[in-house]
Each structure stands twice: as C-alpha cells, then as structure tokens.
Image (cartoon, rainbow, N blue to C red):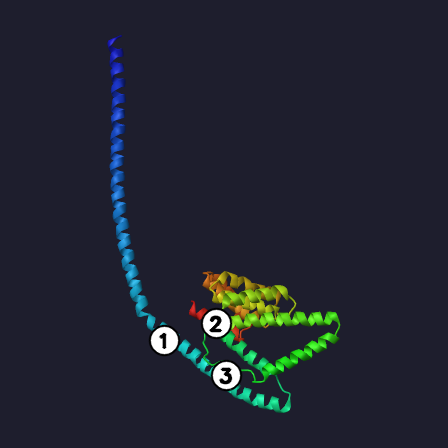
Amino acid sequence: MTSRCKQAVVCLVCAGLLGACASKGDMETLQNQAYRDRQESRKTIQRLEEDLAKSQEALRDDIQKSTSPVQARQANTWAELEALRVQVAKQQEKLETLTMKFNALTNAQGEGPSLVDTVRDVQNIKIALQSQFGLEFDSAVPAAPADAGQAAADTGKTKAEAAAAKPAEQAKAEAKANTADALYAKAEAAFRAKKYEVARQYYSEFATAFKKHPNASQAIFWVGECAYNLQDYGKAVLAYQEVIEKYPRSTKYKPAVLKQGMAFFKIGKDKAGRAVLQDLIDRFPKDPESIRAKQFLKEHK
C-alpha cells in the first residue's frame, strides 16, 4: 500500500472517531438540558400550586364575607314559608270548627256535603305544600263523625243488597272501582305517613292496573313525588315525563313540569332543568308553578 493510501485510510478512521465523539457529546448535552428542563418544570408546578392555594384561600374568604346577604334571603324565604304554615294551620282550625257544625247539620237533616271528601281534599292540599315547600303541619286531620262506622256498615249492607239485584257485569265493574279506590287510599295513607317506598309501590300498581281511571295521571305524578322524596331523582324525572307526555290536560301537568325541572338540577343537569323551568314560565307566566319556578331559578343562578 502506498504512503498516500495509508494516509487516506488514517484520515477516514479519525473522521469516524471524531463523529462518534461528537455524537456522544451531543447526547450528554441533551441529557443535561432535559434534566435542567425537568427541574425548571418542577419549580414552575410548585409555584402554580402555591398560587392556587392562595387563590382558594382568597375565594373562601370572599365567600365567607358574602354569606350575609345569602343568609338574609334564606331568612326571608323561611319567614314567608312559616307565615304560610301558620295560615294553613288557622284554616285547619276553621275546618275543624266547620266539621263540628256540618256533623250537627248532617245528623239533623240527613243530607249535606260529604265531610270525608272535604277533609281528604284539604289533606291533599297539605300534602302538596309539604312536597313542594318542605313544610310540616302539626294539626291533625279532623276525625270522622262518631257514628261514621255504623253509617259505613249500613251503607255497605245497602250496597251489598243492591248489588245482588244488579246484572253481573255491573256488579263486576263496581267491584273493580272499589278495588281501585281502596288501592289508591292505601297509597295516599302511606305517603302521608312518609313511607315513600311503600307508597311508590301502591301508586305504581294502581297506575298499571287502572290505566283508564280518572286518577291515573295523579298516581303517576305521586310515583314521581315518592321517588323525589327518596332522592331517586332519575326515576322522578321519568315519572314526571310520563305525566307530561300522556296527560297534557291533567291537573298534575304543570306540577310535573315544575318538579321535573327541579329534579334535573338535583342530578346535575342544570342546563336541562333551566330549559324546562323557563319553558313553564314562558307558557304559564302567572300560574303558581311558574312563580315557584322563577324563585327556584333565582336561587340557582
């Protein structure tokens, strides 16, 4: 091999070694830079965490300072509800007085409006107030007349005797109606006793068995109310939706829309709840349900 060829080979070998050295040096430089970057990132994260902690502390202070107006609004609201409770209690007292007078008149004349129906209507109003506003009423429901048991027995005998003379189909229809009324009464009694799971079962059974009954929409609504009181808000939304879709002319239509909107807020669907309540307000601006919806939306801004 000539001298020039040897020199060329040596140069190539040196160049390869220099390239390898350069690559190794570059890798060390990159590793050092990455280490410094990680250290800097840790410091940055630490500073951000400290800033976040300070911001949270400041936010807690601001909330603490701003609770006075909130507490004042809550106090006003509860004052209004307490006033309503007192008014209902007074009306209940008047009803008890009227009950005594009606009893005297009914015993004397043998006719007049049914006190049982009147008491049931007032009790239903009280239940609705309890469900919507969370009120409690101490006064008891007026008792039935002392001779009501005997009268019921006499009425039962009369009905039995009359049923024997009626066609079989008519008697069967009346028996079914009596069964429906008895089942609905059980559901109402369980709800009044705050046995919401039992009441829900009775109302559900009624709604399934007596779909054409005048109280069918009522039963489905109270299924929703039972679920709402049991904090099963998803099931409540579905029950209210069934009333809304199937019974648009029911007296429970607007209450179902109101409570569905409130239930949506309970499950974190604020946007859906706000849309439902605003639609109620737009369509029925002067109705009690819309007034309650406006108040609810103000409380959940």
Q: Amino acid at mark 1?
A: Ala
Residue 45: % across, % down: 28, 49
Q: Quadrant of the C terminus?
A: bottom left
Image quadrant of residue 214? Answer: bottom right
Provide the secondary structure element on which disc 2 rests.
Answer: helix
Q: Tell me which numbered mark, 1 or 2, is placed earlier along the sequence.
A: 1
Image height check: is 26 above or below 124?
A: above
User: From where the camera sits, is residue 279 visible?
Assistant: no
Task: Name the residue carrying label 2.
Answer: 294
Q: CA distance from mark 3 to mark 1?
A: 30 Å
Q: CA distance from mark 2 to mark 3?
A: 29 Å
User: From where the camera sits, is residue 126 visible?
Assistant: yes
Task: Name the residue carrying label 1.
Answer: 72
What number is the disc on residue 92? 3
217 vs 235, left or right, is: right
Question: Do residues under tags 3 and 1 come within 8 Å of each other at their CB atoms?
Answer: no
